[in-house]
């Protein structure tokens, strides 16, 4: 009797020998949007996301919060909405910051960050205050519910803060303005990044004592915004400290890397992470999966390999998708530490039947390999 999906997945994550190839599709966003629109295919309507994964013969990959964050009482937050515009203000003893988000009119209710928290060098002081006023705590409420739902049909992971430079440049400031601030005020910006570094590691210390064996981040790593020299300076030291913290608690350190990666692949084995998730290959990037796995096999686990555009009619035909998956598995399916997944998720406008088609190709591959 073979081992269950959860144990098989965990073996693959640890680059141990496995009996079958794991296929772990991420279609959370597709599920939310299509459920809201009433466009879930009839045969799947009424199913939970976990049960839908079971129905299409995929392995469950469920994210859950186990580390919560909140500001102390010295920070006051107010928010107001006018039409599709949400203004959120953060009041601190040393100044006020605000963001502006635009909410889409469709059922996805996706938010676009129109105005970032930081507009000028003057905003770094209240930003520093917000960082230091942040406190973390461990919670088991969400995990216990999902653990009962998932069972042995997959894994539960949690997502924690990204590389501090990415938090600052992407979320707090916006990349263009962040680069100007970094060049014009290097000492002040580096102090913010160090403050984030120290604070974020506190979250990982909580996760190391938490219930999730797999701990990921929200980096959305991309060499266009974090080129190799920035990666070595800002990401590697952070990842290596994260790994040390998580390994002490028996956890696996994962990075969400869904961007352009060909220049970063040579840096992956020694970066500090155990798993790279959401690797997106050609034609959506310059990554060739066979070449990547030739370099990475046995050194770091890779989950991904399917360009999200291939799940849509605009990307290829169904027959072309099947041929792509067959060829991909012939090239890298046998590699130790390879998990078939999305780069980076199944789009909301996908031809959802393709998820089950991938499962059927994987089943045939697993039968022929054993």
Image: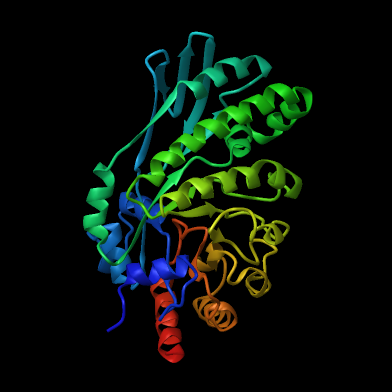
Task: For the C terminus, give its image quadrant.
Answer: bottom left
Q: Is residue 69 above or below residue 349?
A: above
Q: Is residue 336 visible?
A: yes
Q: Number of labelled discs? A: 0
In the picture, measured across the screen, residue 266 lies left or right of residue 148, that is right
Q: Is residue 238 above or below residue 155?
A: above
Q: Residue 88, image x and y in percent?
A: 45, 21
Q: In percent of the image, x 52 and y 48: which residue is there?
A: 244
Image quarter for residue 209?
Answer: top left
Q: Residue 277, image x and y in percent?
A: 52, 59
Q: In percent of the image, x 54 and y 32: which residue is there?
A: 198
Q: Is residue 284 above or below residue 243?
A: below
Q: Residue 318, image x and y in percent?
A: 49, 76
In the picture, measured across the screen, residue 335 lies left or right of residue 290, that is left
In the picture, measured across the screen, residue 343 lies left or right of residue 72, that is right
Name the residue furthest top: 93
In the picture, measured across the screen, residue 133 lies left or right of residue 73, that is right
Q: Residue 270, image x and y in percent?
A: 65, 57
Q: Is residue 108 visible?
A: no
Q: Is residue 159 above or below residue 346?
A: above
Q: In percent of the image, x 32 and y 60: which residue is there?
A: 40
């Amino acid at each position: 009797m073979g081992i269950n999906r959860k144990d098989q997945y965990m073996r693959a994550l640890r680059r141990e020998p496995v009996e079958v190839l794991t296929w772990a599709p991420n279609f959370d966003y597709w599920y939310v949007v299509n459920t809201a629109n009433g466009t879930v295919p009839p045969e799947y309507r009424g199913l939970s996301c976990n049960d839908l994964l079971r129905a299409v013969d995929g392995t469950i990959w469920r994210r859950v919060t186990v580390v919560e964050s909140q500001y102390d009482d010295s920070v006051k937050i107010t928010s107001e909405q006018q039409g599709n515009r949400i203004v959120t203000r953060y009041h601190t003893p040393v100044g006020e910051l605000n963001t502006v988000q635009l909410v889409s009119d469709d059922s996805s209710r996706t938010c676009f960050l129109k105005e970032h928290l930081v507009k000028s060098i003057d905003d770094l002081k209240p930003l520093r205050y917000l960082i230091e006023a942040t406190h973390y705590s461990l919670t088991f409420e969400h995990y216990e519910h999902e653990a009962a739902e998932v069972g042995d049909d997959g894994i539960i992971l949690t997502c924690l803060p990204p590389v501090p430079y990415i938090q600052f440049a992407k979320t707090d400031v916006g990349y263009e303005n962040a680069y100007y601030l970094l060049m014009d005020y290097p000492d002040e910006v580096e102090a913010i990044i160090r403050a984030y570094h120290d604070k974020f590691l506190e979250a990982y210390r909580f996760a190391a004592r938490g219930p999730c064996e797999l701990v990921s981040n929200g980096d959305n790593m991309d060499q266009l915004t974090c080129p190799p020299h920035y990666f070595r300076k800002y990401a590697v030291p952070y990842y290596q400290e994260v790994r040390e913290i998580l390994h002490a608690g028996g956890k696996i350190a994962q990075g969400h890397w869904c961007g352009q990666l060909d220049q970063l692949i040579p840096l992956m084995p020694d970066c500090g992470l155990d798993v790279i998730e959401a690797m997106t290959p050609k034609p959506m990037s310059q990554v060739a999966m066979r070449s990547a796995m030739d370099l990475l096999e046995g050194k770091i686990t890779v989950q991904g390999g399917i360009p999200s555009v291939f799940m849509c009619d605009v990307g290829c035909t169904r027959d072309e998708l099947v041929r792509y998956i067959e060829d991909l598995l012939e090239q890298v399916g046998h590699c130790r530490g390879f998990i078939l997944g999305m780069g980076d998720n199944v789009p909301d406008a996908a031809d959802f039947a393709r998820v089950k088609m991938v499962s059927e190709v994987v089943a045939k591959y697993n039968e022929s390999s054993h």
